Image: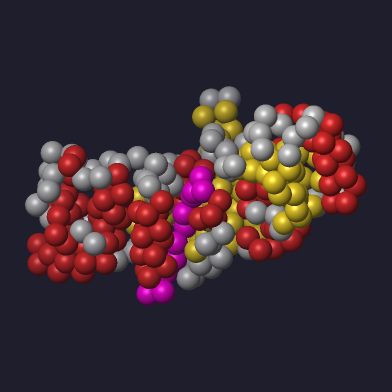
Amino acid sequence: MLETKDLTKVFGRLTAVDRVNIRIEKGDIFGLVGPDGAGKTTLLRMLCGIVSPTGGKVFFGGHGGNGRKGRPVLGYMPQRFSLYGDLTVQENISFYGALYGLDKETTRRRSGEILQLTGLSGFSNRLADNLSGGMKQKLALTCALLARPEVLILDEPTFGVDPVYRKEFWKILYQLNGEGITIVVSTPYMDEAELCQKVAFMNRGAIISIDAPGNMKKKYPYKILELRAETRDLDFLASLPGVVEAGFYGDKYHLAVREAGLAKAAITAALSEKNIRIIKLEEILPAMEDVFVFLAGNEVV
């Protein structure tokens, strides 16, 4: 349904997007992840036609994206809340309905359905500035859905939103996807990346890897040890024999190691020597966070 061919965007001396080739099938939930400054927002804006590419093309159903022929109806939700804080929820919706060329009755009918879906029905007269962060994101989603898009493009829609609202937001996305909407979403959260059918990892303007989250984890080249100890001051772990990477995750460490048995022995000996008690040390399956760190550091699959 949506494909790019050598899509490139250059700003002066900076190549923000570097010859990107992706293919998104109808009905996909396609995730885009990568560090800050990787080029994700610029790529999404080119998919929407907001930013013109320096080179390459976007294709919709086999048609080039520079014209309207074959282009599906797109809904776009930018990274930052861009609606009007001094307008109510309903006034924002009416304004965007007019921008889409919808008559008042169509806007009223569609907004009623979407407000019910997003849980904003009881807040139609509240000023947008007085909404919580999660409710603002739901309002932005409501406005993006007014045109009944075939493809919904979301730029980090849950950034800065509390976990409860993130969970609710993704329930809505899954419902929309079940109704046939193709979803393209960038996210800084690896638990959300795991909810996508396919994920593209982007760094320095280029796509480094595209695959299903499960396949990405299977391709991860190291073993992961999870360590909990009575202290968090364990900066020396990365220098131990057999340890490739050590990172702190909440109240525990994840250690990427070449051979689990040898690394366990080295870790146990080192902590024993320092009189640090081990609460838990066991091998676990790699998480998307581990894959993310590996790809960001190596730029290879």
Residue 75 percent coordinates (x, y)? 34, 57
**Does 183 lie within the magenta span?**
yes
The residue drawn where x is 77% and y is 45% is 256
Q: Is residue 35 left or right of residue 111?
A: right
Vertical placement of residue 144 versus 148, above or below:
above
Between residues 53 and 299, which one lies in front from this camera angle? 299
Between residues 206 and 171, which one lies in front from this camera angle? 171
Asked whether residue 263 appears in the rendered view, the answer is no
Q: Quadrant of residue 174?
A: bottom left
Q: Is residue 56 left or right of residue 233?
A: left
The residue drawn where x is 41% and y is 44% is 159
**Does 10 lie within the magenta span?**
no
**Outermost residue, top side:** 13
The residue drawn where x is 63% and y is 53% is 288
Q: Quadrant of residue 128?
A: top left
**Outermost residue, bottom side:** 179
Q: How is the image coloured?
A: secondary structure
Residue 58 percent coordinates (x, y)? 51, 54
Asked whether residue 47 appears in the rendered view, the answer is yes
Residue 246 percent coordinates (x, y)? 73, 38
Q: Which residues are magenta?
A: 177-189
Residue 110 percent coordinates (x, y)? 19, 67
Q: How many marks?
A: 0
Q: Is residue 79 left or right of residue 32?
A: left
The residue drawn where x is 17% and y is 42% is 130
